Amino acid sequence: MSALPFCRVNYLEDKPEAVNVLNIRDKQEKERVVRDFFLTKFTHWQYEHEYRFLATIDDLGGKDAIKFKKDSLASIIFGLRVNPDDAKHIKDIIDQCYKGIDVKLYRTEKIKGKYAIDVKEIKNLDKYIGLLGNE
């Protein structure tokens, strides 16, 4: 997949249909499906006017990271299925590398019966991580 510049997110009422990209042989069709999947959100989030940057490690010349200024990181949202070990790793990075920088932390909850999630601020990250293993 060739690197895409910052792309505008599309907002829809209905969740896009799941597609197994491994079954798609045509490269352009595969790129379209991936783009549609990663660039689609529920209409509730339309006020964000969000753009996303999509690239593979190959697009980045084999590098697995994109550098940015530390104070550019305003918040982190933990997804519905975040692994407790991954959340702990992110906590360790914040503790070590972001001292004195106000990084807001949020968790997500699925809204029953809708293609939507609710985002709530995390007040105590250690407690949140502890609860992840018990869900």
Image: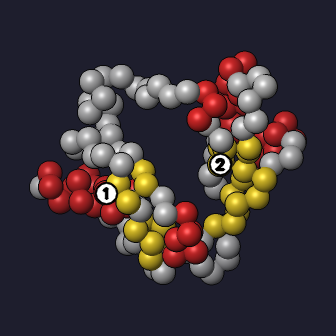
Which numbered disc flags the more N-terminal residue, 2 or 1?
1
Read off the residue under disc 2: 77
Q: Which mark is residue 60?
A: none
Please tell me which residue is depicted at 40% across the width and 68% down the height of the picture.
Answer: 10
- The answer to whether residue 112 is seen in the rendering is yes
Left or right, 133 with reference to 48: right
Read off the residue under disc 1: 35
Tally of marks: 2
Residue 35: x and y in percent read 31, 57
Seen in the picture, residue 120 relative to 3 is either above or below; the reply is below
Q: Residue furthest left?
A: 26
Give the quarter of the image for residue 86: top right
Residue 118 versus residue 53: which sits nearer the camera? Answer: 53
Please tell me which residue is depicted at 24% across the width and 60% down the height of the picture.
Answer: 32
Please tell me which residue is depicted at 52% across the width and 71% down the height of the picture.
Answer: 46
Seen in the picture, residue 120 relative to 12 is either above or below; the reply is above
Give the quarter of the image for residue 112: bottom right
- The answer to whether residue 95 is seen in the rendering is no
